[in-house]
Amino acid sequence: EQGTMGQDRVVEVLRECVDDLRLVIDSLEPVGHDLVSLLATMRYRLGKGATGGLVLEWDVHDLPPLTWLEPPDALHVLRLLQEALSNVLKHAGARRVRISTRHKGSYVEIRVEDDGEGFDIDSAQMGRGLKSQQRRAKSLGGSVRIDSSPGNGTRLSLRLPVQRELPPAKPS
């Protein structure tokens, strides 16, 4: 607005805004509580060249319906995965990223694994991105875990409950 940004940065900000708008629109698509359908929408968007040269490998298996998965929750899932992929693009120096799903009894898991540089988790500072991911996962009733070490890539595991407890009703 103040005209102090270079053209390249303006283009980058506009591209991020358009990507964010698409994410919001995608989260509103009726997915019928189906996490796999939500991931298919994301895969379609990523297939249109938003991967910065990364090779994406998809290992998505059938998952049970998540009856609690409504548009606001879908947006949290998509934003969480978007942040994970953004981190890979910006920091990992990776060539490949693998996105996989598994049903493990009372929860489902989405993993984002890269073959990048990795990092020492103990000495890394927890930035806004990771805090945001953890906050989003918690709001979904789930959890996020990051595993990494120098030279061995990074794995983000998002675990979501198949059945989610409703929060207690607030007194009126």
Image: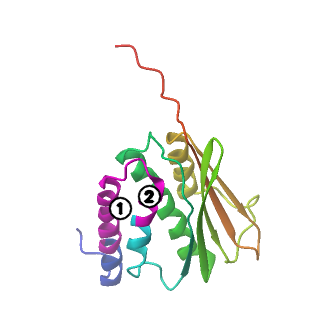
Q: Observer-nearest residue: 150 or 81?
A: 81
Q: Evaluate if marks 1 and 2 touch, with contact meaning CB atoms under 8 Å apart.
A: yes
Q: Secondary structure at mark 2?
A: helix
Residue displayed at 55% across by 42% down: 162
Q: Observer-nearest residue: 87 or 30?
A: 30
**Residue 88 lies in quadrant:** bottom right
Main SS of the magenta segment? helix
Residue displayed at 42% across by 20% down: 169
Magenta includes 167? Answer: no
Residue 22 image position (x, y, % from top left): 31, 65
**Residue 119 lies in quadrant:** bottom right
Q: Which residue is mark 2?
A: 78
Q: Observer-nearest residue: 11 or 102?
A: 102
Segment colored magenta: 14-40
Residue 24 image position (x, y, % from top left): 32, 57
Side (left or right) of 95 relative to 23: right
Q: Observer-nearest residue: 169 or 121?
A: 169
Identity, as a three-letter code, of the amino acid under mark 1: Leu
Residue displayed at 48% across by 44% down: 66
Vertical placement of residue 65 versus 37, above or below: above
Cα–Cα gap, marks 1 and 2: 7 Å
Q: Which residue is mark 1?
A: 23
Residue 155 image position (x, y, % from top left): 67, 64
Residue sitting farthest toward the top: 172
- Pick whichever of labels 1 and 2 is earlier in the sequence: 1
Side (left or right) of 3 relative to 127: left
Identity, as a three-letter code, of the amino acid under mark 2: Leu
Q: Secondary structure at mark 1?
A: helix
